[in-house]
Image: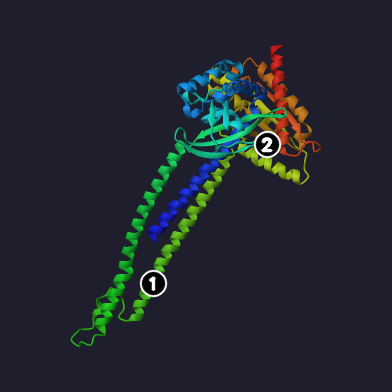
Amino acid sequence: MCLLIGLLAVFAVTRIATAIIDREYTDKAEQITEAVVTTLDPKDVLEMRDAVLDVYKDVEDKVVPSTEWGSDEWNEYMAHYASLRELPVYHKLQEHFRKYQDIYKVDCIYVTCYKKENMHALYVIDGAYGEDECPPGCVDSFENGIWPDDGEIVPATITNEDVYGWLATAAYPIKCGDDWIGHLCVDISMNEIKAKEQRYVITIAIAMFGVMLVMLGLSLWYVIRNVTKPILTLSDTAKNYCSENNDVVHHDFEKLSINTHDEISQLLSSMKQMETDMNTNINTLIDTKVALQKTEEQAQSLKELAVKDALTGIRNKTAYDYEAEKLEKDLDDGFNEFGLAMVDLNFLKRTNDTYGHEKGNISIRRLCMLVCEVFEHSPVFRVGGDEFIVVLKNRDYRNVDALIDDFNNRLEQVQADDTLQPWEQISAAIGYYKFDKKVDKTVDDVFKKADKAMYERKVAMKAERKE
């Protein structure tokens, strides 16, 4: 029974740990793909995709799949696409992807388009570094692959391949105007966590085996000492006491470690022992209850940390997702007076490259402080490296234009303050949108329009700087 329980426990812990890890990585992959798509300029992606397809159409009958990587035939085929890597849009998109790879600490962000009639997945651009980069025009060819329709979100999957090992992969469609131009994909390596999981399972199995041996040893010792030996002693003593041999002296019960000379006293002594054992078990249960309470408190603390941004102390993207769910429920209940304000820090990459990431973090925290001060009655969330969302309700909802002006005025004052360091003279673009029940259906509709307004403000600021 101990062996069976131990094996079941190891199996259950393994399945639970695997399910939790897989769910965490697939959720992360899906969230990152959706987040990165919102930051892309679809026109750049369309330009790069069309450039790749133009070459692909000319050499469609000469395609060499990536399974032949490094062969002379593959190198000859890929040479047709070599000039594409010199395009400015290629370097712009690759730099954009690598920035988010570094932010989210993922292995690869890339764009593919699908030629279902040829069963080809065609790489448009890949943000991977070094030898892991798939060049434009590289083709994955497979009969049983995933062939999403235009605009279809591909749920995250976990694969284990010989070349890359364990990967969590998700794909999100990219739209330019009314046309779907491809899918943005994210690969997250799970090799390290899978190795840790394996070591964890082995450790648990060894620990369970050790616990089983200890339990078996203690159980045998306990049974022999408190059950088998007393019963054998009582049985032998009873036989001698009832023996028909008159030569046997009937004082055997007196030799036992029992305080009385009759069977009732012996039973009472056994009951007292049972009571002591039961008290021991109750104390164990109380200790277990206290330990469980501490575990629940720790779990609650971990839950709070899960929705808190470590750098700024405000709520993070996960917390915003919860807030968005609440807003959706409010919409179902008829409450629709809310809006979203998007704030994006300018020049973060330049600050990081010039002064270091610590100074970039100072810029992010200063912007966070300013947003929280201006929108003091609204929840603020950090949803990306340099992006914040403000949920506008009540007073801030009604006075949003004045708050936007106040925000921009404060930024101008900060930028004009020569006593501040360059990384303290922050610049940011802000845009907002209020829910309109005539045209909007979901919170995501408001999110996209607020993001668009912010982007338009960023473009306007760039134009002002050029003037």
Front position in the image: 434 or 284? 434
Q: At label 1, which amino acid type do we have? A: Lys
| Most foreground residue, 237 or 116 | 116
Q: Quadrant of the N terminus?
A: bottom left
Outermost residue, left side = 247
* Mark 1 / mark 2, whichever is N-terminal: 1
Measured as percent of width and height from the top left, residue 335 is found at 77, 43
- Quarter holding the C terminus? top right
Q: CA distance from mark 1 to mark 2?
A: 62 Å
x, y percent for residue 177: 72, 27
The residue wearing badge 1 is 272
Where 289 sits versus 266, above or below?
above
Which of the pair 419/266 is nearer the observer?
266
| Residue at left offset 36%, top offset 74% | 269
Could you say which quadrant of the image residue 84 lies in?
A: top right
Q: Is residue 423 visible?
A: no
Determine whether the residue tagged by mark 1 lies in a helix, strand or loop. Answer: helix
Q: Amino acid at mark 2?
A: Pro
User: Residue at the location (62% across, 16% down)?
Assistant: 419
> Is residue 170 found left or right of 333 in the rendered image?
left
Residue matched to label 2: 379
